[in-house]
Image (cartoon, rainbow, N blue to C red):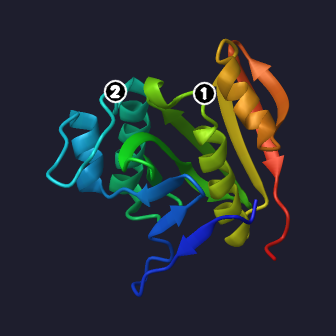
Amino acid sequence: MGLYCFLRAASLLPVTELRTPRLRLHPIDTAEGERIVGRRAGAGDDWAEDFPFDGDVLGVRGFLAAAAAYGDRRPFGHYRITRTADGKAIGGIGFKGRSENGRIEVGYGLAPSARGNGYAAEALAALLDLATAHGLSRVVAETTGDNVASRRTLERAGFRHTGSNDDLHQYEVLLGAPS
C-alpha cells in the first residue's frame, strides 16, 4: 500500500477521487447512483459494455439507502472503478454502513469483462489506505463460499478468514496507524 494518491477538493468533502497505477476510484453521488441502478448511462458516463452488472446495482442500492438515511458520508461512500487505460467504468467498491468503534465493512465487484486482472485487489488496497488515513483500525468483508476469486482477493489484500455463517465467509484486516 502507499502507492495511491488522494486528491483533495477545496470543499468540505475530504476526498474527491482515489487513483492507483491503473484505476480511478470516483466517489459517486446520488444522481450517478440512480443512473447506475437504472442502467442508464448519462452524457458523461463511459461504461464497459457489461457495466453495471447485478452486483453493482445491488451495491449502489445500498449506497442510495445509506445516503437517504445519513446524508453524504464521503469519503466512506461508494466509488465507481474506472480503468485509466480506456476510461471505461468497470465496477464499484465502497464502504457499507457507518464506521463503529474504528470498524467498517467494505464490498466490491467488477464487470465480468474486467475480472482476472487484479483490479479488485488494487481498488481494495486504495480503500484500505483511505480507511487507515482516516483513523479506522479494522475493515471487514464477507463473501460466499463459492466466490473463490473474491476470497483470494481478500486474502491477497491481507484479510484473514474469521468464520462462516451458512454460506457466507467473514474476513477482516487490522489496519496500522497512519504514517
Marking on residue 137 = none
Label 1 sits on residue: 116
| Residue at figure coordinates x 59%, y 58% from the top left | 20
Label 2 sits on residue: 50
Q: Nearer the viewer, residue 150 or 173?
A: 150
| Mark 2 or mark 1, earlier in chain | 2
| Residue at figure coordinates x 59%, y 49% from the top left | 123
> Does residue 168 sit above or below 66 in this rendering?
above
Q: Quadrant of the N terminus?
A: bottom right
Q: Are marks 2 and 1 in contact (CB under 8 Å)?
A: no
Q: Secondary structure at mark 2?
A: loop
Residue 15 at what x, y percent from top left? 50, 72
Residue 88 at what x, y percent from top left? 36, 44
Q: Amino acid at mark 1?
A: Gly
Q: Secondary structure at mark 1?
A: loop
Residue 105 visible from this viewpoint: no
Residue 129 at what x, y percent from top left? 70, 62
> Does residue 111 sit above or below 123 in this rendering?
above
In this rendering, position of residue 96 left or right of residue 52: right
Q: Amino acid at mark 2?
A: Asp
Q: Nearer the viewer, residue 54 or 95?
A: 54
In this rendering, position of residue 39 left or right of residue 73: left
